[in-house]
Image (spheres, helix red, strand yellow):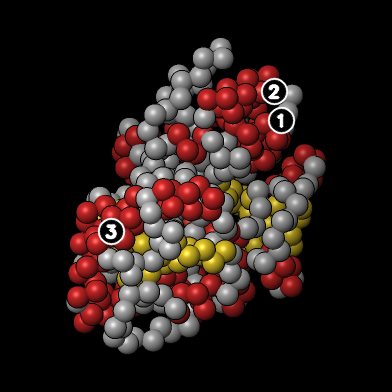
Amino acid sequence: MSKILHVTPHMGGGVGKAVLGLIEQSTQTNSHFEHSIVCLEKPQKSQFIQKIIDMGETVKFCPSNSEICELIKTVDIVQLEFWNHPAILQTLCSQYLPPMRLLVWCHISGLHYPSIPKKLLTNTHRFLFTSPCSYESIEVKSLESSMRSHLGVISSGGGLDVLPQPRFVLHDALNIGYIGSLNFSKLHPDFVTFLAAVKKQKPWFQVRLIGDETNRTILEKLSYSLGYSDLLEFRGYRADITKELSELNVLVYLLNPTHYGTAENALLEAMAMGIVPIVLDNPAEKCIIEDFQTGLIIHNPNELVQAIDWLATHPEEHFAIGKRAAIKVRKHYSYRQTENAFNSHYTQLMQQSKEVIDFTDIFGYEPSDWFHAFFRDSSTFLDTAAIQMSNDLSRYALLEKTKGSVFHFLDYFPSDIKLQRWASYLSSNG
């Protein structure tokens, strides 16, 4: 029995769902790989982690430096659930870690901020993306072909084959919604503008928003300023997402073109329920959707108007696209496939020797270095107070309070002078 240690900041959201799915599948198939988990933070949501504990699997919370080292010594493979979270950087860079076989499962695309440090790509035994769109990042494209053999893709989307089967029926009306984050680092900042273009021509048009109500006030003010007080219907967070999905037949999933996401679980779950998605031509979404086959891909507000009009006037084609979408994602996004893919990598990794990895050479020595390591342009943040703010849509990621932002890092490392200066500047000029 080979032992796999998952090191993750937490077990919430898409990461928690994916790791739980992998471990559940592994126990069902009596895999010869045994999984355990280290959570670097205390759990805020226990939905996924409690299921793993109930299965009898080992879970360790907030281990000390010495405990981390001892755990690494006792396992065969360390699987790092990776994104630019301060707890990960602190764990990797503030202590000497013993030799390991390291597999990185990367939960950010690396196409924009946060980028993936090139040295991380080249100093791991296996580096797995969660979307093939990551192959288009500058760092990956600049690698010599001989340095790419240890790269791969395993989507963190899964379990779609066990969702309730959709009711494939022709619809007389469009029931339209959006599911997911309302933060503008993820949701397109001009989301309301896109929707208003439709509302102007179709007074009945309304979109139901399901999820955390961050930015609700901003979105409502934008809608009201355009004269459309009934454009948005806020439903808030819902534990039973399948019930919400069963009431929709169109998903208007318009994301910030510079968003960091990859697997897009909300999108996949909607497709599995036969809902036709409308997305922008962003890399991650285009890796999931085939235009007019499993969804519609648009580029601007006018094309959203055309897409809604086409779906409203072509119910049979609407039905067919939804059915194809459900069949495709249920077939290709199962945890059985996830487990098989990981087991293949684990087996190959076991043929390699453990090695010491110098993470400070990758990320630096200080918390401000760790934060700064994810900027492709080193001039974005400077040692002086003259921070160069990006004017494109990626700036919204810099203003997040969590998600690896400077504010997130400052919460972890409040005495770091550079982080203090950068956070102060962003607070004043964001």
**Front-lying residue, 163 or 26:** 163
**Front-lying residue, 142 or 428:** 428
Question: Separation of disc 2 and disc 3 at Cα?
Answer: 50 Å
- Residue 403 location in percent, x, y? 57, 43
**Is the residue 232 above or below the residue 361 in the image?**
below
Disc 3: which residue? 200
Left or right of 413 in this view: 83: left
Per the image, label 1 sits on a secondary structure element best described as loop
Instruction: State yes or no: discs 2 and 1 in contact (Cβ < 8 Å).
Output: yes
Disc 1: which residue? 413
- Residue 271 location in percent, x, y? 38, 71
Q: Amino acid at mark 1?
A: Phe
Of the two numbered discs 1 and 3 on the same chain, state the one appearing first in sequence. Answer: 3
Disc 2: which residue? 416
* Crowd rating for badge 3 (residues with CA inside 10 Å; few <14, some 14–19, many 20+): some
Q: Is residue 32 something one can see in this rendering?
A: no
Residue located at (30% from left, 83% from top): 171
Of the two numbered discs 2 and 3 on the same chain, state the one appearing first in sequence. Answer: 3
- Identify the disc placed on residue 195: none
Q: Amino acid at mark 2?
A: Asp
Q: Amino acid at mark 3?
A: Lys
Left or right of 74 in this view: 394: left
Per the image, label 3 sits on a secondary structure element best described as helix
Per the image, label 2 sits on a secondary structure element best described as loop
- Residue 4 location in percent, x, y? 63, 57
Question: Separation of disc 2 and disc 1 at Cα?
Answer: 6 Å
